[in-house]
Amino acid sequence: MRLLSPKLISLYAGRCPLPSLRRPRGFTPRAAAVEEAAAQKPGGGKKKKEQELDHIPLLLEDLANPDKVVIAQTAPAVRVSIGEEVGMEPGSIATGQLVAALKELGFDYVYDTLVGADLTIMEEGFELMGRLKGKLEGKADSAPLPMFTSCCPGWINFVETCAPEFIPHVSSCKSPHMMIGALLKNYYSRQLGKEPKDVVVTSIMPCVRKQGEADRIFYHTEGGVRDVDHVVNTRQLGELVRTKGIDFKALPEKPYDEFMDIGTGAAAIFGTTGGVMEAALRTVYEVVTGEPLGALPLQEVRGLEGVKEATVPIKPNPQGPLHNAQPLEVHVAVAHGLQNAKKVLDEVQAGRKQYEFVEVMACPGGCIGGGGQPRSKDRDILKKRQAALYDVDERATLRRSHENPIVQHLYEAILGEPLSHESHRLLHTHYVEGGPPKFDYMKAKEEAARKEREVETCVDQESAAPHCLLHPELGREEGQVQGQAAGTGAAGEGEREPQVNW
């Protein structure tokens, strides 16, 4: 695991948005001087933000490339906000038109990120059960409680840069769209007969931090290919639709493409504060007790209060995964907005609150209030978008993540079971104090082009040379190549990749 240097970590400390959580560890005099100089600047001394790469031209280039298969996936919050970009009423559910518009823009396949949300609940729910079991059994090496959610990149950045002592408490699950990206690049690309580098995954998100999340250096498949290539936020998508002259409101509705086209109501409410918590409790309660959670919706974690709390009673079930012969109480909290998250952390750190599970979203209202969402002067805009997502949930035939047949198939065909080795390889991650290095998109693109030129040169010289000096494997004997394919190569004897039958 590659860590940032102490010098860079110290500089990160100056970026912490909540000064009271800055830690003296690694905070050098140089960093203090930088912060002091910034504070003396007019206008509040805010440090200039690094220029981010504009992915829209890169996406348009990929859409125009006939050798690429370009896939879009859409977050739950986008379907209840994209309509505002084209003159529809706030809170309109425009899922079918959203899919149709992406097809008009040239995407080959459009999938639903709700599948990734349901996967997240399976992995995160079983991770929570593992921590609860460790506590009940008194295991000293068990991962600590409370466990915090991990699907919000703003929250993850906050923990890594401002409260790194809480890193062990954060779920190791990737966010839903990153799980989908890993599955598409590692497995679905083969079903298409394509190399992962020729499958372009674009996430349509409500968040301006999702691109930075996708840029984390360890979010890539073997060979250095990114799991998610581009992120387009809701406003950017609205601009693309207008630029291309697409009459969004007049589009006939289209369904998501098969393979990742079914999501549950639990996944839909991921887009609002309290949604991840409620979705997780629906599955965890049923797995632990063997009975469905009776009260749907779970009103205690709904609404737009800054911090919400609830206590969920768990019935005795000695034969269940927790082997609890006595009733249990699971104490949970939900916070949205980083100031509210800080309050929760302060309470936990001071020992005044004892939670087992905490959901945090950095933006007001959760993803429905994300920085990439349409701007609105409507004071009730968050309530309208939230109500729309709850409406999607209530109309859903399936309302619990473990009921999703696509998720069940993914475990049967690829993953095995929650928290398996393959699940950890594809669906989980880790965190770094100060934040990890980021993927350099343009450098990687130039490197890929250079390698392609080298391979072309090798092929041109193949008839004149016994082997290629740049790529020796191109000149090996046929028997050697066949020997690798038979299992004597890098994969190791006896190992084989899971066979997938879609």
Image: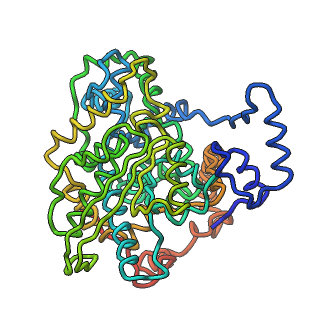
Measured as percent of width and height from the top left, residue 476 is found at 56, 73
The foreground one among 137 and 429 is 137
Point out the image quarter for the C terminus.
Answer: bottom left
Measured as percent of width and height from the top left, residue 304 is found at 37, 37
- Picture mark count: 0
Residue 61 in view:
yes
Q: Give above or below for 101 relative to 88.
A: below
Point out the image quarter for the N terminus.
Answer: bottom right
Residue 195 in view:
no
Q: Residue at x 21, y 46 (%)?
A: 297
Residue 401 relative to residue 190: left or right: left
Name the image quarter holding residue 166: bottom right
Measured as percent of width and height from the top left, residue 412 is found at 24, 67
Measured as percent of width and height from the top left, residue 341 is found at 50, 48
Q: Residue at x 79, y 56 (%)?
A: 7
Q: Give above or below for 51 relative to 140.
A: above
Name the image quarter holding residue 307: top left
Q: Residue at x 22, y 80 (%)?
A: 325
The foreground one among 53 and 401 is 401
Q: Give above or below for 123 relative to 277.
A: below
Q: Residue furthest bottom?
A: 493
